[in-house]
Amino acid sequence: MVRMNVELKARDPDPDATGARCLALGAEDRGVLRQRDTYFAAPRGRLKLREQGRPDDQLVAYRRPDATEPAQSAYRLVPVGDPDALREALDAALGTVVVVAKRRRLFMWENVRIHLDEVEGLGTFLELEALVGEGEDALGAARDKVTRLRAELAVQDGALVSAGYADLLLDRPQALLRAADTAMRNAYAPYSGFRVGAAVRGATGAIYAGANVENAAYPQSQCAEASALGALVTAGESAITAAAVVAERLERCPPCGGCRQRLAEFGPAGTPLYLGRPGDVPEVVTLGQLLPSSFGREALQR
């Protein structure tokens, strides 16, 4: 069953003070949890194995946009009886991306989970998760509760965090470059011998990669960027927040003119594009720099 939350995340420099505010609001202190989340390279959305002590271990599949405002997430929870065996199987099939270990103090206020998290390697955070119930304005009610709690718990604008813990632990440009490099190694380029890989990050945080596919009839060939965007759309997404391109024979391989237009269809002018190789410091350009005065959908709406 698909469940829905409205979520908000922020850095929390004083968890003790936040905990006191929670109690003053009448929130119920549910104690401390120790959680270990192993993230896998899922082709759609995000997938993690949450180990927090049997029988509460869970497989969590979810989609959540990167946003600093209260954001809607959709998720599925599957009970797990043998986390060790499942972790090994998922690692063999998909590959492990990152492991997030945290100490979580849990409060409940109405149907909102308040998490005071101490995350290894990152620091302390506040996370709000309001369950979206049934009814005509259930989503609006959940947003209102998160907005109220943000004010009551004195969450400042500068403390808000858009990315999840996994993304914060990862070097986000390097994750894209690694995905592009892996795709590049599978490129079908028997005629030019010029293998290229591209990767794009969707609004849910998922990464989609593709390689160039050549054809004996040259015009029927497909660039790596087009392959990656095709994977994005096939997964049900329609926007990108970042992209990367890796080529076998060039240290920096900018997209061709056609692919600049393709990328601009799915990302605003400020979307970063990383050019280089995994492990190196990439060159960073924006889609607006690559394609100034571009033709976009706004021209068709006049």
Image: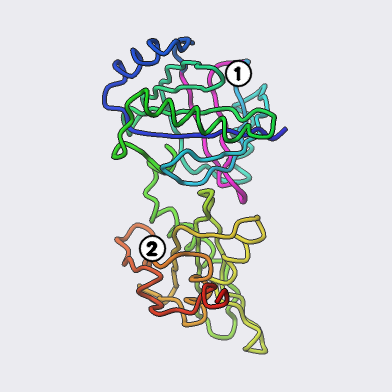
- Point out the stretch of residues depicted in magenta: 34-54
Q: Residues within 10 Å of mark 2 (few under 14, many from 20)?
A: many
**What's the amino acid at mark 2?**
Pro
Label 2 and label 1: CA atoms lie apart by 39 Å
User: Which quadrant holds the C terminus?
Assistant: bottom right
Q: Amino acid at mark 1?
A: Asp
- Position of residue 25 relative to residue 278, above or below, is above
Q: Nearer the viewer, mark 2 or mark 1?
A: 2
The magenta stretch spans residue 32: no
- Give the secondary structure at mark 2: strand
Which mark, by number, is residue 128?
Answer: none
Q: Residue at x 66, y 32 (%)?
A: 3
Residue at point 31%, 20% (across, down): 15
Q: Position of residue 197 (x, y in %)?
A: 50, 68
In the image, taking residue 90 as reference, residue 100 lies left or right, namely left
Q: Residue at x 60, y 74 (%)?
A: 188
Whether 78 is drawn above or below 31: the answer is below
Q: Residue furthest left?
A: 13
- Specify the quadrant of the image occupied by residue 239: bottom right
Is 244 positioned to the left or the right of 13 in the image? right
Q: Circle 1 sits in a helix, a strand or a loop, which is it?
A: loop
Q: Label 1 belongs to which residue?
A: 56
**Front-most of residues 136 and 43:** 136
Residue found 52% across the figure and 52% down from its top: 203
Residue hosting label 2: 272
